[in-house]
Amino acid sequence: MVDAEIHDPPHATIIAVSNQKGGEGKTTTAVNLAASLAASERRVLLIDLDPQGNASSSVGYSRDQVTIGTYELMLGQASLDSAIQPTELPTLSVLPASADLTGAEIELVAIERRESVLRRALEAAGASNRWDFIILDCPPSLGLLTLNALVAADAVLIPMQARYFSLEGLGALHGTIEAIRNSFNPRLVIEGIVFCMFDRRTNLAKQVVAEVEEHFPQYVFNTRIPQNIRLSESPSFGKPAILYDIGSKGAIAYLDLADELLQRMEARSSAPPEAKATPEARSPA
């Protein structure tokens, strides 16, 4: 008699969308990547960790409407099930940011193991067995909320503009990721770098891309997110781009990004065990 094949339980891939520098396309990427993955019939949870609440409002939940959200979950005042909300996409849920998240940085200081509050809350709720992807939208700073995201995450997706000031922010974030891997989360890796608001006509953009590819050759996504008015308009309607205008260049670019991400993950999962990248192998020297 042949034993039945034993499968590992499903495990969500937790991706922190992070850049310590503001204005790099972080929230736009978190929202639209989450929506695009959901459109491919993956179960996705979008978690808004930014006190500005822009990810929440981009899927229909403005901050003044949210009474239970990320803050209440992390402070132990609410369960995950009571805090998550549905969206127009059947396979996309959101854990929105309430107005109280603004004070979370101060209140977390007094909590034991404050850097892993989010991870413990997600583990207690069995989140990894309920979704295929958990996308974390981080604040544009390195505080306790971003630290919690990076400690909870399996990987970091870094959106950036093709500008020289953005290069400085990339270097700082890389140092942060290495420090967190060494101290709190050894499994944390860089999933990739995606260029946002990209204008391929300018020499500056080409030069910045070339420099990033020289220093981080294995990480730069082929997909570029263009400057697109539909991406700018869609949050005011409480919709990701694929629901606002699926034929727009911005919506198509994020669908392509989701497809490229899935292809990368599939390639890694089908590689021989000895060829699969460890965190050390997938992080630049």
Image (cartoon, rainbow, N blue to C red):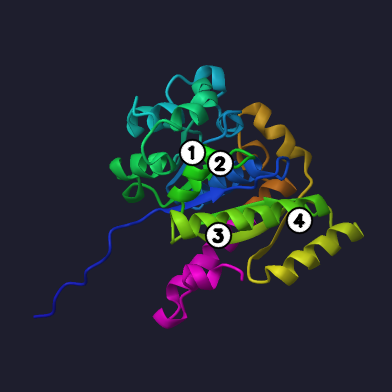
In percent of the image, x 35 and y 39: which residue is there? 121
Structural distance between the alpha carbons of marks 1 and 4:
26 Å
Structural distance between the alpha carbons of marks 2 and 1:
6 Å
Q: Are marks 2 and 1 in contact (CB under 8 Å)?
A: yes
Judging by the rendered image, the residue that carries numbered circle 1 is 47
Structural distance between the alpha carbons of marks 3 and 4:
17 Å
Mark before the other along the chain sequence, 3 or 2? 2
Q: Amino acid at mark 2?
A: Asp
Say few, some or many: other residues with alpha carbon within 10 Å of mark 2 (under 14 / 14 to 19 / 20 or more): many
Q: Amino acid at mark 1?
A: Ile
Query: Magenta residues?
Result: 256-285
Is disc 4 placed on a helix, strand or loop?
helix
Q: Nearer the viewer, mark 1 or mark 4?
A: 4
Is disc 1 placed on a helix, strand or loop?
strand
Judging by the rendered image, the residue that carries numbered circle 4 is 167
Q: Are marks 1 and 3 in contact (CB under 8 Å)?
A: no
Image position, residue 213 (x, y; %): 73, 68
Q: Nearer the viewer, mark 4 or mark 2?
A: 4
Say few, some or many: other residues with alpha carbon within 10 Å of mark 4 (under 14 / 14 to 19 / 20 or more): some
Image position, residue 167 (x, y; %): 76, 56
Position of the N terminus, as image quadrant, is bottom left
Visible in this render: residue 163? no
Task: Determine which of the numbered discs, if any, sits on residue 137 in the image.
Answer: 2
Q: Is residue 239 left or right of residue 278?
A: right
